[in-house]
Amino acid sequence: MTASSSSFLLKMKNIHKSFSGVEVLNDVRFDLYPGEVHILAGENGAGKSTLIKILGGVYTDHLGSVEVNGREVNFKSVQQAFEAGISIIHQELSLIGELNVAENIFLGKEKSSYLWLKKSQMLDYSEQFLSKLGLDINPKDKMQDFSIGIQQVIEIGKALAFNAKIIVMDEPTSALTEPEVEKLFAIIEQLKQDNCGIIYITHKMEEIYRIADRITVLRDGKYIGTETAGKLPSEKLIQWMVGRELNQQFPRHIRSIGDVRLEAKNIFVPGTASSPAPRVDGVSFQVRAGQILGIAGLEGSGNSDLLNGIFGSFGSGAKGAIKIDGIEFKIDNPDKSIKRGLALLTNDRKKNGLVMNMNIVENVTLASLSGFSPGYWLRPKSERTNVAVTTRTLELKAESIFQCVDSLSGGNQQKVVMAKWMQTNPKIFLLDEPTRGVDIGAKHEIYELMNKWTQEGIAIILITSEMPELLAMSDRILVMHRGRIAAEFTSEQASQEKILSAALGERKTA
């Protein structure tokens, strides 16, 4: 794609940004044409979010120039950036659960006449816009009543509703099902036809090569290069991102499968008042020592509820029979599950995996605190020593083990969650989206960890929305549909088409 500088929607040049004297962006440049998808790639901590926050008016004290439509700008606020036609869809949802859908869409941009809100006008507009997004929902319903996937689509719609010409999408598909992803890509194609420019951030390689026109890579706060997608093969892209070659995207070791480690029979998780159908309805399966069992399913299939039910997150509300190493285990509460060797890495590390305002040491020992406090007295030296060893094993990048986890990159936050569960010495690891929002280098390290755990005899149950990851890492795959097992495949039998077909309910229980 070639054009004169005057045809650029956006041009950022010689961008420098420091925090407390530490330079996080060093002479970075980025540009965007009308009608293109430009991927901004790099590992967690590469500087992508900082660059986007400069564009969006969040950070105003930076060096370098920003031009929008050929005019140099110096945004002093998010509102100024928005008025210039820049809309940013952040990875972390900015929705308010207690407000209804229309109120969320117009949050900060309410239509009013003097002191009175034009509620009916906002509702009508929201209904029309939601219809364009393919969402058959009532804009009067509260946001908290919808799944995370639907909320993500609404978040995207919220950014698109006000005719922005530069749209930033930061990991927009992290919580979307395959059909929802297809809807998003259709919306992106329409935006391109309307001459909008899209800056797209994702760690999913298949998405990059499906929608990218050009790709720019940052590493350690520095500009590495820009190239058209067709001239930048994945091997070179990964090398640009991580600074080294990765011999295999999905490293696999020969596993020695042992005896049945976990046996689950007739697991049942009830529905809710608003959705009374069972979330999990009579699911049975086995997983052996040293084995990775993948569990696939679309949003609402019940796969995450299944892991939470087994772990005791629903208390005695979940029913069914569990055996660990042949010994019966009553589903009761997470504390008992941890003591019996279960560990659950949830799909939302910030909400359910970490305490964001606590430091690394405090988070890592949360699930194993009793081991560091015999007689109810905490032994901080032992706590610090164990955490230091575990975080070194995981190659955690942090200033110190006392750094607040809120200031860590997404990949390093995920390593803190894994370190927490490693401290409990689990026999069975329940991994729900372990690589969500994690860069390619950190993903590779997590895959290596999974292989190490299986070699040690740990059984793993894996949920991932990334199909290549599911197919590459699983020894067996169960597919769930509406709370039940719809199909089962060996790694040799499984394919993307078969799994999606079963997830849509087009295959009877195998």
Image: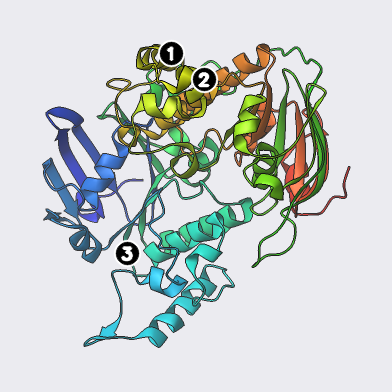
Query: Disc 1 marks which residue?
Result: 386
Q: Looking at the picture, does residue 93 appear above or below residue 325? A: below
Q: Secondary structure at mark 2?
A: loop
Q: Earlier in the sequence, mark 2 or mark 3?
A: 3
Q: Earlier in the sequence, mark 2 or mark 1?
A: 1
Query: What is the C-alpha distance between the residues marked 2 and 1?
Result: 8 Å
x and y, in percent, of residue 351 in the image: 46, 45
Query: Disc 3 marks which residue?
Result: 164
Query: What is the C-alpha distance between the residues marked 3 and 1?
Result: 50 Å
51 on left or right of 502: left
Q: Secondary structure at mark 1?
A: helix
At x 45%, y 72%, the residue is 100
* Three-letter residue code for mark 3: Ala
- Structural crowding at the residue carrying mark 3, measured as other residues with C-alpha within 10 Å and reported as few (<14), some (14–19) or many (≥20): some
Quadrant assignment, res 238: top left
Task: Say which of marks 2 and 3 sits in front.
Answer: 2
Please state which of residues 284 and 375 is positioned toward the viewer in this rendering.
375
Q: Earlier in the sequence, mark 3 or mark 1?
A: 3
Q: Which mark is residue 423?
A: 2
At x 53%, y 49%, the residue is 175
Quadrant assignment, res 287: top right
Q: Where, quadrant-wise, is the C terminus in this rendering?
A: top right
